[in-house]
Amino acid sequence: MNLLKQKYTLPAGKIDLTSFGEVLVDLITTGEDMALAKATLFQRYFGGAAANVAINMKKLDNKCALISRVGDDSLGQYLKNILVKEKINIEGLQCDPTRRTPLILVNKSKKTPSWLPYRGADRYIEDKEINYRLIKNSKIFFLTTFILSQKPSRTTALRALDYALQEDKIIAFDPCYRPQLWPEENNGYQLVKRIIGTADFIKPSLDDAHSFFGPDTPENYLQRYLKLGAKIVILTMGEAGVLAGDEKTTIRIPIYPTTAVDVTGAGDSFWAGFMTGILSGFTVERSIKLGSGTAAYKVKNIGALSPIPGKEEIISSFNI
Amino acid sequence: MNLLKQKYTLPAGKIDLTSFGEVLVDLITTGEDMALAKATLFQRYFGGAAANVAINMKKLDNKCALISRVGDDSLGQYLKNILVKEKINIEGLQCDPTRRTPLILVNKSKKTPSWLPYRGADRYIEDKEINYRLIKNSKIFFLTTFILSQKPSRTTALRALDYALQEDKIIAFDPCYRPQLWPEENNGYQLVKRIIGTADFIKPSLDDAHSFFGPDTPENYLQRYLKLGAKIVILTMGEAGVLAGDEKTTIRIPIYPTTAVDVTGAGDSFWAGFMTGILSGFTVERSIKLGSGTAAYKVKNIGALSPIPGKEEIISSFNI
């Protein structure tokens, strides 16, 4: 069977997507090519892949919930305010009484990009505070890798994933493995491998693949992910478009013409468009195109949460 | 004996001051009256009372060492670069391989001032990495309260203090108690009380006193600190000047006329001027005046490390 031509039978659920992962503050250096050790001015942005994906999905008219944890502090309040404004279901947003809202210092320089995470509450998502009905009521369960990198959030995430699998939800996994986030032990690679094997969809970028496998060709990356048991792999390659495949077929989809101003969060908007396609009953191939079309709109403006139009406009713009 | 008229017999030591405490990054909101939850732009500053005191002391021509701990990251590198540039002895600056350089988000608003500490390496100053010869070779041992608030740094600091006491060093303690920094248990108050009893000099601000004792008058604060065993208490009261005393005598010293632009770090520059006086063989009273004179220069410019002139210029400017 060619999975790429397949339309998914959707599980029951009033919520389209439950996203399990990080919501955090990005403090991004202003000005170009300024190393973190020299940067003097930082601009605050809403961040975290799990939250960005949920908000982009909501903009495409899906019902979305977020499971995450922030601190009981002013930055946590800021993040919560935005999630509420964007109409994300935050029943699953835990508030840690003692630990801080996570933040990441980011240097946007193209020469020596670097980042410095200050983690806190995000590491402590509590299993006993998880409302499993959120997952039971959802069609897709989306999981990030960031949140897996430290316990006890890792343990909670794995239990939530097991529950989603047992309830036959569609599993979407973002395999963004960065060894420097896994300080306790070095089994991160093995764990991410194992989760890839349970997912319906994974969407690594070339950076993710390089960080996971070391240097190789896009074609080989695709095959190596498939060998780990991923059912469908969508490798996003920036301007080189998308290479996607299942065990039988490989396809290439070029990007849509656009004026790229800021690629921050392009992957998150791709995910949102792609999953919106799946939820709309599109084939995987057409859903990938909707992902690319959504990302093409996102990169026209600055910020991970820059405006995107409705699904119909994206479809008609690019003849998807 | 009227301690305020006393000149101190200085202990032997090639180093004038060893400062034990925090060096960290302050990320301060730009613009006035912007609550942290709404602030979008943050400026990076060198911070930490222990480091500020050491640098100000060095500017007044003293030999200074810092015992502290930063992360092995770009912010740690930034702090280290400044300490090296300012010619601080950093043999005692530990570098944590896994934990972050501490940073504090600060809102400078006068209406609702607030701060959000992200602690890391500063909590983990290792006793086994302390070079006790630094303390043995110093005349004054200066200790902050911030660094006492969490273990294991607390344990290390207490051992270093015991050693300094045993070696008959002059003990200067900054009793800046803030309950929100003491999350593990509530014995901070008792511990700070005990250390006050071992110190030759403490210099609380009115804010420190309020945070420690609750509301009371300056005169009562002074007596309450003395009752805890502090030999000399120097209560700084901003524009109202200084109220200082020992068990026999109380004196008031008005501030010197100045154009205050930014009071950040005024207390740290006061400490530096005061201890420079003690090291110069001045009486406590004249040393307090040198502290006030130094602070009067500091507040003329923005930043905790704004320029201050040499000791002689401060003395002649204000007829100290």
Image: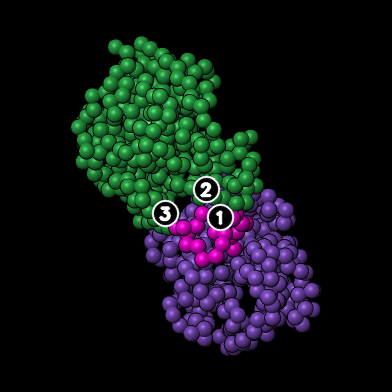
Chain colours: A purple, B green
Could you tell me which residue is drawn at 41 percent across and 40 percent down? B52
Marked residue chain, label 1:
A
Q: Of callouts 2 and 3, which one flags the residue occurring earlier in the amino acid sequence?
A: 2
**Tag 1's secondary structure?**
strand
Query: Is B224 positioned to the left or the right of A50 in the image?
Result: left
**Tag 2's secondary structure?**
strand
Query: Is A69 positioned to the left or the right of A310 in the image?
Result: left
Spot occupied by residue B134 in the image (x, y as percentages of width and height): 24, 41
Q: Quadrant of the N terminus of chain A?
A: bottom right
> Badge 2 is on which residue?
B27
In the rendered image of this protein, does residue A263 appear above or below residue B246? below
* Between B101 and B45, the one nearer to me in the picture: B45
Q: CA distance from mark 2 to mark 1?
A: 8 Å
Q: Quadrant of the C terminus of chain A?
A: bottom right
* Between A315 and B14, the one nearer to me in the picture: B14
Marked residue chain, label 2:
B
> Badge 1 is on which residue?
A42
In the rendered image of this protein, does residue B156 appear above or below residue A107? above
> Badge 3 is on which residue?
B78
Amino acid residing under circle 1: Phe
- Are dots 1 and 3 in contact, CB under 8 Å? no
Start-end of magenta stretch: A21-49
* Between A279 and B220, the one nearer to me in the picture: B220
Amino acid residing under circle 3: Tyr
Q: Is residue A52 visible?
A: yes
